[in-house]
Each structure stands twice: as C-alpha cells, then as structure tokens.
Amino acid sequence: MGAKIAALLVTMAAGLAAGVAILFFMLIAMNGYSESDATWGLGAFILLALVASVSMGFVAYFVTGRLIKREFSPVIASLIGIVIFSATGFALEIGCSLIGVSVAEFVRVKF
C-alpha cells in the first residue's frame, strides 16, 4: 500500500513541478497578448494541467498496484509507474500548454 501511495504522490508532485515550469515558459511565449486575452489561455492551461497531473498520479497508483499483484518488487513497481506516468504527464502538459495558447488566440481573434 505504501508503494502505491508513494507512486501517486511522487507522480503528482512531478506533474505539478513540470506544470509550473511549463507555465513560466508559456508566460514568456504569450508576451504579446493583452492581459484579458492571456487570462483565458492561462486559466485553460492551469485547469487542464491539474487534471493531467491528478489523473496521471491515479493511473500510476493503479498500475503500481497491478505490478505488485504480478509479483514485482514494490520499489521496482513504483519506479516503473513513476517514470512512465511522469513522462506521459509531461507530454500531456505540453499539449495542455498548446491548447492554452490556442484558447488565448481564439479569444484574441473572436472577441
């Protein structure tokens, strides 16, 4: 049980740390947008990044449990879950940042 919870917490922490780093670069990328336009894109990114981080944490939790049931060592099972789903979460958060910039562009053009 401890390995599953550790996988959940470490994966979520890694996802949140990656989200903060991506948010910093996203702020630089959205330098030319007005504040009212950029707010919508940043809000969309934050919401989607939180969903991605939490969901990857829970997926890592369940996968670690499945690996332990298949007689993997708890340390190895949690490392597998953490590495795979932290990388997947990072890729999802990059996609979330692209969606956030697209939302800001949509708001800038249409409203």
Image: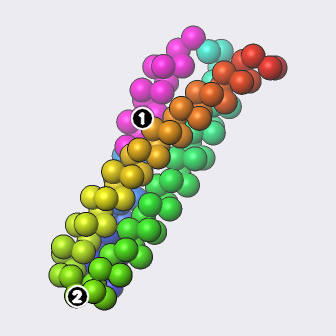
Identity of the residue drawn at 50% across and 39% down: 95
Viewer-proximal residue among 101 and 70:
70
* Side (left or right) of 24 relative to 44: left
Dot 2 or dot 1: first in sequence order is 1
Viewer-proximal residue among 80 and 54:
80
Dot 1: what SS? Answer: helix
Residue named by callout 2: 71
Q: Is residue 94 above or below residue 52?
A: above
On whether residue 20 falls in the magenta region, the answer is yes
- Quadrant in which the N terminus appears: bottom left
Identity of the residue drawn at 66% across and 21% down: 105
Is any atom of residue 77 visible in this view?
Answer: yes
* Side (left or right) of 73 relative to 67: left
Q: Is residue 24 above or below residue 72?
A: above
Identity of the residue drawn at 66% across and 25% down: 104
Give percent across and percent down for residue 73: 18, 81
Q: Main secondary structure of the magenta part?
A: helix
* Side (left or right) of 54 relative to 15: right
Q: Amino acid at mark 1?
A: Ile
Give percent across and percent down for residue 96: 53, 40
Give percent across and percent down for residue 5: 35, 75
Q: Nearer the viewer, mark 2 or mark 1?
A: 2
Q: Is residue 103 above or below residue 84?
A: above
Residue span colored magenta: 18-32
Q: Is residue 97 above or below residue 16?
A: above
Crowding at label 2, few (<14), some or many (≥20) Cα neighbours within 10 Å?
few
Crowding at label 1, few (<14), some or many (≥20) Cα neighbours within 10 Å?
some
Question: Residue reaching furthest front?
Answer: 70
On whether residue 58 falls in the magenta region, the answer is no
Dot 2: what SS? Answer: loop
Residue named by callout 1: 22
CA–CA distance between discs 2 and 1? 37 Å
